[in-house]
Amino acid sequence: MPEDIDIKTIIADYMGKGFLENIIDMFKHDRSLYPLIGELMADGRIRVRLGISALVETLAREDPENIVTSIPSIVVLLKNENPTIRGDAVYLLGMVGHRDAVPFLVGALDDENSDVREFAREAIEEIEAKSSRRL
């Protein structure tokens, strides 16, 4: 494999081809990949972004202790100029479902885009409800 092709590019290309199950297995076996989630969500290909959403949804359910490590990479997207990317970030943080994401979601309540604000409100409510069910 050429040295200039990095793992993020490989994952995005595989995701773009619909190999979600393979990517899920990669993440489960290599926890160091979790911080790439934010960068992958910023990919311009809709199929990649949809795949990353499905990846996060699956890993939040099947590997909740490790999906938390993706939060910092997702939070970076909250500053993206594109409101769709900011909305996707809020959505992912909600799927991660960890209380560590709440302060960032609270910040998104002031986003200039009404959809981002609404997604943030819903994500906060879901995380708080999930946390209260655990008690």
Image (tube, grey):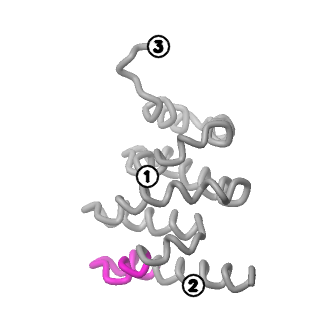
Q: CA distance from mark 1 to mark 2?
A: 22 Å
Q: Residue at x 48, y 83 (%)?
A: 121
| Viewer-closest of 64 and 53 | 64
Q: Residue at x 67, y 37 (%)?
A: 29
Local SS, label 1: helix
User: Vertically, is 14 above or below 66?
Assistant: above
Q: Which residues are magenta?
A: 105-118
Q: CA distance from mark 3 to mark 2?
A: 45 Å
Point out residue 96 in the picture as x, y percentages from the top left corner: 58, 64
Point out residue 128 in the picture as x, y percentages from the top left corner: 60, 83
Q: Earlier along the polypeptide chain: callout 1 or callout 3? A: 3
| Left or right position of 54 against 48 | right
Q: Earlier along the polypeptide chain: callout 1 or callout 2? A: 1
Q: Quadrant of the C terminus?
A: bottom right
Residue 89 among those drawn in magenta: no
Give the amino acid at mark 1. Gly
Q: Which numbered tag is attached to residue 38?
A: 1
The residue at which mark 2 appears reads as 125
